[in-house]
Amino acid sequence: MGIPTTDIDQSRMLEALRLAQLGLGTTSPNPPVGALLYAGDKLIGQGYHEKAGEAHAERRAIQDAIEHDNAHLLKGATLYVTLEPCSSYGKTPPCTDAILEFGLARVVYGMQDPDARHRGRAKALLESKGVQVCAGVQEEACKAFLRPWVHSLQTGLPWVMAKVACTLDARMVRSAERWISCPEALRIAHELRLQSDAILVGGATVRSDNPALTIRTPISHVPICKQQPWRVVLTRHRSSLPKDAKILTDEHASRTIVYECVENLQDMLRELHDHYGVVRLMLECGGHLLREFLDSGLVQEWVQDMAPMIGGGGALTVPGEDFLTRELHLHDVTIQQAGVDFVLRGFVGS
Amino acid sequence: MGIPTTDIDQSRMLEALRLAQLGLGTTSPNPPVGALLYAGDKLIGQGYHEKAGEAHAERRAIQDAIEHDNAHLLKGATLYVTLEPCSSYGKTPPCTDAILEFGLARVVYGMQDPDARHRGRAKALLESKGVQVCAGVQEEACKAFLRPWVHSLQTGLPWVMAKVACTLDARMVRSAERWISCPEALRIAHELRLQSDAILVGGATVRSDNPALTIRTPISHVPICKQQPWRVVLTRHRSSLPKDAKILTDEHASRTIVYECVENLQDMLRELHDHYGVVRLMLECGGHLLREFLDSGLVQEWVQDMAPMIGGGGALTVPGEDFLTRELHLHDVTIQQAGVDFVLRGFVGS
C-alpha cells in the first residue's frame, strides 16, 4: 500500500539515524530511535528518544513541530522514523495514536519491530486508517545500529563489547608509562563508556589499577540524562577489594555492583539484564576474565585500541597457552586512526 | 644558478619516483633510481636503474630517447632524476659525462648524493659547464624512498624489516588452519620478499615449517633480472637442519647461507652487507630470534599483518615475560586493508 521509496526518503532516513545516535547510552532498556517530520520539502520537527519512560522519538518530533509553530503543517505531513512505531501501551501511550491524532499522511520507517508480537502491527493499523506506510527504508543501516538492542531483546542478555588497549604485541601494560592509549584513543574509550549501560572488571583490576570507570571529559557530547554506567566487579571475595577503592567510595558508589564467586557468567549477565536493565555491557577486565567470556561465547563485539609500539613484556590481552575453545573471527571490521593509535572494531561471527 | 622549481617539475619528479620503484629489489648494492627526459612538454625518454653493473637510470633514459627516434631532441632537453647523478667512475662511467655529451640543458634531481665525498659534486660540475641544475625537488619523498639504502650506506649494515603475521592477540599460529594470512596479505608478503635482498629465519622455523622463502606468484611484477633473495638461516648446529629441507635442496640452494652459533648479530649483518651485498633484509623468524634483533636495536622497519581473529593460544610475535630493553616506538605508521586482513607498517623511532 505504501508509495515507492525515493532517494529523498533514503537520505532523510539517514538523518533520522544520526538523531537516533544521540540517544545511545541513555535509552536502555528501550532502543535509541530518531524521527523527523516533513511537510513537503520543509523540515517541521525532529526528535529522538532520550530515556525510558519519556516520550518516544515520534512524539518528540511532533512536540518539536508544535514548539516551532509548525502545528498547522502536521496534517498531511510525513514522518521518518528509524524503527516501526509502537502500537501498544507501554510506559507511554502508543505512537500510532499520535500519528492518527495529528493527521500525518505518510509514515516511512527503517526497521520493523523485531518483536514477533508487534512486527508489522503499526503498519497494518496505520494503513487501515488511510495512512501511507513505507517500511524498510535504510533497513540494513537501521538494523546494524540496533543490533545490540535486538540481541538483548532476543536473548535476554546484554550485548557484550570487549574493549582492550594494547601494544602491537598485545601487551596491556608498559614498562614505565601508565597509559597505553594516546589521548585521542582515550576519548574514544570514554565515548564507548557513554554508550554502555554497564562496565565490567575483575577484582584484580580494582586492586591493581583502582579505576573509577566513569565517563569523564573530554567527551564531545554527554547527555544531561546520562547516568554513570553501572560498575560491575567480579571477585572471589568482596573482602579482597580495597575498602577505599574508588568504585566503592566515590559519589557514584551506588552504581557499583559486586558479584562474588560467579560460577556461571551467563546467569550473571541475565541478572544484569533483568534486574539492572543492562542492554550494552562493556568489558574492561584483564585477560584471564576476558578469556572466560570468550570461551563461554558471550562476547558480541571486539574493540582493540592499538598503540604503535612493541613492549615485549607485561600482561597479554588474551593470556594463556591453550587455544580458545573456538577461534574467534570478527566480521565487518573497521579501523580508525585516533592520534597515533589505531582503533579496530568488529563483530564476533557465528 | 638553477631556475626555480615549478608544479610541473614536482609532478614529473613523482613520475620519476614511480619509475624508480620498479628497481626495488634488484639494484643492491646500488640504489633504485628513476629518470625522465623532457623536450618542452614532450616526454622523449625514460628509464630506471635495474641492476648493479648495468646502465644507470640517466643513461637508460637517454638510450630510450634514442631508441624512440628522439635523439635530435636531446640537445636542450631537461632530465628529471630522483637522485643526484653520479660524477665519478664506478662500474659504469659517470652520468654527468652523458649529460654533457648529449647537450642536456637542465637537470632536476630529488635527493642529493648522501655520500659526503660526492654530495653536490654533480651540481657544481654541471653548472660550471652551463647546465641549469635544480636540486631538492620532491626531496622528502625521494629521501623516504631511499631511506633503506641510505641507512645501509651510512652504517655498513642492511636495513632490517621485521615482518610478522598474527592474530589480534599477537599469536603467530592457529589451532587448525595452517595460515594466518589471507591470500591478499600473502601477496603483499611476497612483494616484500621481492623488495628484499635476503630473508632471515632461525633453524627452528626451518625445522617446524620447512619454508621455501622464495618469491612466488601471485605477484604483479617480478623483474626478469630478480634473483631469488638470499635465504639466511641462524642455527646452533647446522646438523640440526633437516637434510631434505627445501632451502638446502631446491633449485635455489646456492642462495642459502647458514650461520652457526652467531654470537653477535651486528657482525653477522655486517658480513651479509659486505660479502653478499645485502641492503634490505627481511626477518621472517620466530619470536625468540626476533626479540634478539629488537633488543639489539637492529630493526628499522616493522610490518605486521593482522588477521581479524583471536586465537588465545600458540606462539607470540614477541614472546617472553620481560619488557624489551627499550620499548620500540613506530612512526609514520600506515595501515592497509588486504582482503580481510590489515597490514600495518611503520618505522622504528630513535
Image: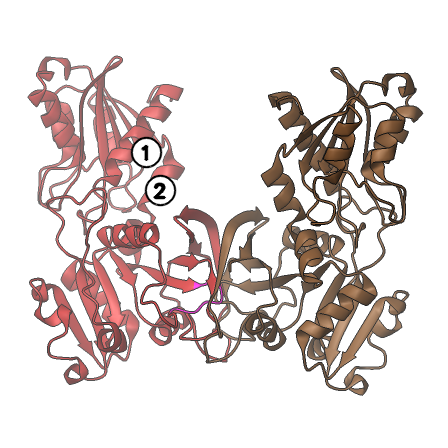
Chain colours: A red, B brown
Relative to A130, say whether B23 is above or below: below
Report the predominant secondary structure element of the magenta stretch: loop
Relative to B104, say whether B135 is above or below: below
Place of residue B101 in the rendered image (x, y in percent of width and height, measured from the top left)? 89, 27
Q: Nearer the viewer, residue A89 or A234?
A: A234
Magenta region, residue range: A167-172
Are the residues under marks 2 and 1 on the same chain?
yes
Place of residue B45 in the rendered image (x, y in percent of width and height, measured from the top left)? 83, 26
Q: Residue A171: say if magenta.
A: yes
Question: How far, Cα to Cα, is label 2 from label 1?
Answer: 8 Å
Place of residue A268 in the rendered image (x, y in percent of width and height, measured from the top left)? 24, 71
Disc 2 and disc 1 in contact, CB within 8 angstroms: yes
Q: Residue at x 40, y 21 (%)?
A: A7
Q: Which residue reaches farthest front?
A: B128
Q: Nearer the viewer, residue B339 or B64?
A: B64
Quadrant in the picture for residue B152 = bottom right
Relative to B322, say whether B145 is above or below: above
Relative to B270, say whether A133 is above or below: above
Chain containing the residue with disc 2: A
* Kind of residue at badge 1: Gly
Residue B130 placement, left or right of A287:
right
Query: Is residue B65 among the parts visible in the rendering?
Result: yes
* Pointer 2 or 1: first along the chain: 1
**Dot 2 lies on which element?**
helix
Kindly identify which residue carries mark 2: A143
**Dot 1 lies on which element?**
strand
Disc number for residue A167: none
* Kind of residue at badge 2: Lys
Q: Residue A122: say if magenta.
A: no
Kindly identify which residue carries mark 1: A110
Quadrant in the picture for residue B75 = top right
